[in-house]
Image (cartoon, rainbow, N blue to C red):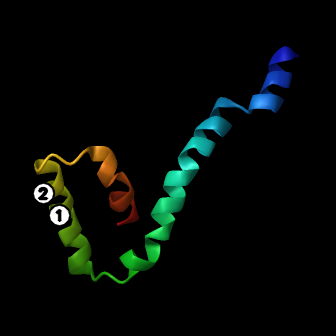
Amino acid sequence: MIEKALTKVFGSAHDRDVKKMMPKVAAINEQEKDVKLLSDDELRGKTAEFRAQLDQGAPLDDLLIPAFAV
């Protein structure tokens, strides 16, 4: 019974995880219109671009949103 009440107040672990991810999902969706304009060759080139950024020391978290958008 207490567990049920706590879940109603704080949400389930799944609900909290989803809520935490929503800003990243929104940022990915914002890039959709730009990514749609890219040709197939430009999309393939993004992989090399991301690898080059990683090789230069860019943190993986910085590439998360653009990589998922592509």
Disc 1: which residue = 49
Residue 31 % position (x, y): 43, 70
- Point out which mark residue 12 bears: none
Q: Is residue 45 above or below residue 12?
A: below
Q: Residues within 10 Å of mark 2 (few under 14, many from 20)?
A: few
Rendered view: 47 above or below 40: above
Q: Left or right: where does residue 58 sit relative to residue 64? A: left
Q: Which quadrant of the structure image shows residue 40? A: bottom left
Q: Residue 52's spot in the image, x, y percent? A: 12, 57
Taking the spot 80% from the left edge, 23% from the top edge, the residue there is: 6
Identify the amino acid type marked 2.
Answer: Ala
Quadrant (top left/top right/bottom left/bottom right) for the N terminus: top right
Is 12 left or right of 29, judged from the image as shown?
A: right
Query: At 62% across and 44% down in the image, what residue appears?
Result: 19
Whether 65 is drawn above or below 32: the answer is above
Q: Residue 4: x, y in percent? A: 84, 23
Q: Looking at the picture, which amino acid does disc 1 mark?
A: Glu
Q: Calculate the distance from the C-alpha at mark 2 to the C-alpha at mark 1.
A: 5 Å
The residue that appears at 80% across and 18% down in the rendered structure is 3
Quarter location, residue 7: top right
- Bin the neighbour count of mark 1 within 10 Å (Cα to Cα): few under 14, some 14-19, many 20 and up: few
Query: Residue 14, image x and y in percent?
Result: 64, 35
Residue at x 54% of width, y 46% of height: 21
Instruction: Identify the residue position indicated by label 2 in the image.
Output: 52
Contact, mark 2 vs mark 1 (Cβ under 8 Å)? yes
